[in-house]
């Protein structure tokens, strides 16, 4: 693999691995606080799946980088600006409707992403994606069921879900951010065109909204910056909690 392609591939892997790492951490905050026991367990299991996907992607990135870094080094020893996740996943967990709406948006995106990455010319990424796709389909079924239940439920559940959708909408396009990294990898047939994924994502989201009686927000403003290390104030607080043990006791084993 050429050096430029190798560097861009590592950056892409970091972006999609960080998405799953940070969202997995956010979901883990529901542990012991779910509205019902089954949801406590379900959200915890989804969080574990996302962390597992992140770990596999980071391992691949470290192997390609070949710089004696492990995935633990990448997770625990980076600063805020070095994280490349989209801003959507770093927002505080909010109420249950907010968590479900975000998870639904991200699961639809992940379904199409991994569906295409299964055909990547990189065999390891294709293998990771095949496993992740199966897990993502479960995540999607779970969040969609709740989207329909909350949206077409009581006046309060509908209102809470609509408010969550309105707040999250401006963070959704960043999942499909494209720069020179993605463009080169598309040319090499390593990743799919994210523009085409965006169209598929919007079509599926709109169908769900019609069933759930949720209105599509009309605000055209969209957030950006996460993919190049410009984050909200929330990510620093999350990382301080996630990294405190590893940074306080370097090389500790447990």
Image: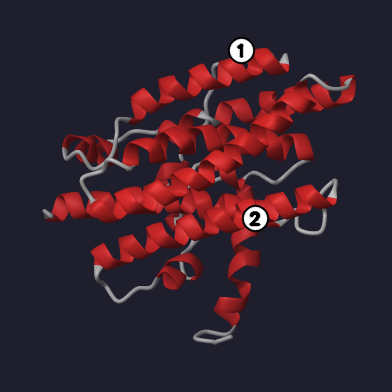
Query: In the picture, which quadrant includes the N terminus?
Result: bottom left
Give the crowd class for mark 2: few <14, some 14-19, many >=20 residues within 10 Å: some
Residue depicted at 79% across the width and 49% down the height: 38
Disc number lying in front (2 or 1):
2
Foreground pick, 170 / 118: 118
Q: Is residue 84 visible?
A: no
Picture quadrant where residue 55 is located: bottom left
**Mark nearer the N terminus (2 vs 1):** 2
Under circle 2, the secondary element is helix
List x then y, in percent, for residue 87: 54, 41
Residue depicted at 34% across the width and 33% down the height: 178
Give the crowd class for mark 1: few <14, some 14-19, many >=20 residues within 10 Å: few
The answer to the question of whether label 2 and label 1 lie on touching residues, with beta carbons closer than 8 A, is: no
Q: Which residue is mark 2?
A: 45
Q: Which residue is mark 1?
A: 218
CA–CA distance between discs 2 and 1?
Answer: 34 Å
Residue depicted at 20% across the width and 54% down the height: 6
Query: In the picture, which quadrant includes the C terminus?
Result: bottom right
**Considering only vertical position in the picture, is 171 above or below 70?**
above
**Considering only vertical position in the picture, is 72 above or below 234?**
below
In this rendering, would 67 be left or right of 88? Answer: left
Q: How many marks?
A: 2
List x then y, in percent, for residue 13: 35, 52
Foreground pick, 164 / 133: 133
**Considering only vertical position in the picture, is 118 above or below 196?**
below
Colour convention: secondary structure
Residue at the limit of the structure toward the right, as seen here: 155
Which label is found at residue 91?
A: none
List x then y, in percent, for residue 219: 60, 16
């Amino acid at each position: 693999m050429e050096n430029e392609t190798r560097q861009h591939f590592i950056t892409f892997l970091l972006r999609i691995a960080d998405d799953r790492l940070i969202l997995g951490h956010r979901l883990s905050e529901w542990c012991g606080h779910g509205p019902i026991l089954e949801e406590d367990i379900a959200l915890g299991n989804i969080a574990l799946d996302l962390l597992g996907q992140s770990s596999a992607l980071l391992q691949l990135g470290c192997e390609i980088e070949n710089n004696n870094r492990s995935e633990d080094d990448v997770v625990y020893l980076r600063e805020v600006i070095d994280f490349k996740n989209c801003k959507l996943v770093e927002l505080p967990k909010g109420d249950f409707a907010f968590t479900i709406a975000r998870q639904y948006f991200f699961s639809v995106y992940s379904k199409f992403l991994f569906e295409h990455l299964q055909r990547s010319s990189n065999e390891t990424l294709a293998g990771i994606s095949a496993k992740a796709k199966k897990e993502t389909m479960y995540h999607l079924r779970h969040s969609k069921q709740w989207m329909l239940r909350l949206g077409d439920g009581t006046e309060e559940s509908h209102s809470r879900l609509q408010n969550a959708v309105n707040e999250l909408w401006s963070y959704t396009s960043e999942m499909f951010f494209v720069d020179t990294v993605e463009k080169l990898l598309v040319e090499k047939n390593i990743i799919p065109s994210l523009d085409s994924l965006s169209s598929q994502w919007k079509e599926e989201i709109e169908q769900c909204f019609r069933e759930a009686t949720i209105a599509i927000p009309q605000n055209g403003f969209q957030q950006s910056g996460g993919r190049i290390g410009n984050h909200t104030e929330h990510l620093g607080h999350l990382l301080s909690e996630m990294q405190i043990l590893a940074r306080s006791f370097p090389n500790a084993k447990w």
